[in-house]
Image: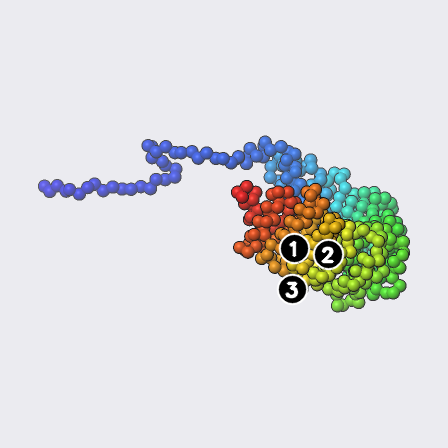
Amino acid sequence: MTLSCKAPRRVLFPISAHRQPTNVKKKKKKSRQLSTNWVIRFVPAELWRSIFRFVSASSPFDESGILRILGVSQVCSSWRSITDNSPELWTNVVLRYNGKKKRSFPNANFHSYVLKKSRGLPLTMGILAATLPTFSSVKDTKALELYLKAMHRAKMLRLQDADILYNYIFQHSREEDIPDLVQPGLLLEKIEIDMASDAAQGSVFPLLSRLWKPAPLVSSMSFFGLNVGEIDFQAFRDTKFPFHQITSLEFNCPVFDDTLELMVSLMPALVNISLHSICQLGDDFPDPTREELLDLRTVSLGGPSYITSKDQDLSPLMDFFEYFSAPALTTLRLSFDSGWTPESFTSFLERSTARIQHLHFDILDATDSHRIECLKLLPSLRTLNLSFTAGLTRDFEQTSLIGKHFLDAMSEWDASEKQFVICPRLKQLTIDYDTLADPTTVAFADMVEDRWRLSTAGKKREFEVVVKEAARLGGSQKSVSEMVRLLLLQKVGLKLVVEPRSWLEGVFDRNLL
């Protein structure tokens, strides 16, 4: 008999995740994170309420905040209870018509749900439309009627397209057939109206007029659309709107000069005006001594992405300075991507007795010399904003960039007067980093340090610098030194805000330097 020396065959089996060897002890990992249940159960309700306010935050007339809060309320009973008892989270009420079916969002049921959640708080309300509703069925009508019925609770109201209401009215053969839904807006403070539809105004404004009979708190109004002309405005005027209460008037569209003159004459309390553009400005425009313009405190000319239209006979907004005095003026915002004439502005400043304290100088084609010349005429300036919002792109001409000539002028010191030659009382400077002509030097940091150490505002630790569009600041070896200089000044007391946040700021926050 032959004996085999062959070793017995070993069969290897994989160790299953569900089957451990008996001699191996399983180590439990210690979790340093709180369980979800613990967080939901023990975080105070007031803290959740504050977080939900942030979650619900959205721009006015945007329903996304409401939808986020609706989602939060479905997570658990605890969060549902918090949102149910936080009516301020449900106050941005928007009725939007969109889609091929031309139905409203929210529908009548959800609209009623939101209004109930907001309880009796004042509302921000808007009627918006991408496609106009036909109101051919009861469902189409019910949401709008619920909205009109709640409109008296509006603190801010935007009527983006009057044709929505026009189509609703059209379904009723006579005006008296329209339900008496609109009540006096006793909480209304601001109203925004689209004046684009010529056909709708005569029918729509009588319905809306029920809102301001009376509206004792309304003080601000804004117009948008294609333009605002005298014919459009006349229908609005016939509704007995309380123009005498208006202190702030804003145009987000062109306005005809005769209409502007008429509006201003009806608003003796007007102190703030914002103009996008003016159509056919004539020689008969209001005289500078007219009382309607003497009390203005804030004037904004132009606006973000301001572009002159070739399809309309628009006069340069700089011409407005020829007819404008306003000795009470304290805030001036200029936003032009074309049509800038420094002579008109300089002439206005030389003849005006206004003590302008706040200036946003957003002039796309201005030069260093233009800025210096204008600022020398503004010794009372407290805040200067040189950030750019005009134009659709950030492609700047070399001549419009902020160069060493301007930075040196801002650093010029008058030893006899013991103050800076330009803007001696300046407390805040805002600038876009990408508009500096040469970001590889430390000229800007030098100027900031000079003003912070020598100015009265700097000595009182009141001087503040805001640097926007700063994605490249500190992003290269040549620009790191300037960023370090600014952050070192911040460490010893300079008020500095950099947007967006730089990686170097994180290093300084950890006190590694």
Q: Residue at x 65, y 38 (%)?
A: 50
Q: Marks 1 and 2, how far apart in space?
A: 12 Å
SS of the residue under disc 2: strand
**Residue 346 in view in this figure:** yes
Question: Residue 361's mark?
Answer: 2
Q: x and y percent of residue 264 in the render?
A: 86, 55
Residue 17 screen position, x and y as percent: 39, 39
Residue beneath label 1, please?
A: 432
Residue at coordinates 55% horizontally, 48% vertically from top-left?
504
Q: Secondary structure at mark 3?
A: helix
Q: CA distance from mark 2 to mark 3?
A: 17 Å
Closest to the observer: 185 or 379? 379
Q: What SS does tag 1 mark?
A: strand
Residue sitting at 69 percent across and 56 percent down? Answer: 409
Rendered location of residue 511, percent (x, y): 55, 41
Crowd tier of the residue under label 3, counting other residues whose Cα lies within 10 Å: few below 14, some 14–19, many 20 or above: few
Query: In the rendered structure, are the residues bearing label 2 and label 3 in contact, judged by CB atoms less than 8 Å apart?
Result: no
Marks 1 and 2: CB-CB under 8 Å? no
Residue drawn at point x = 67 percent, y = 56 percent: 408
Image: 103 above or below 314? above
**Mark 2: which amino acid?**
Phe
> Which is more foreground, mark 1 or mark 3?
3
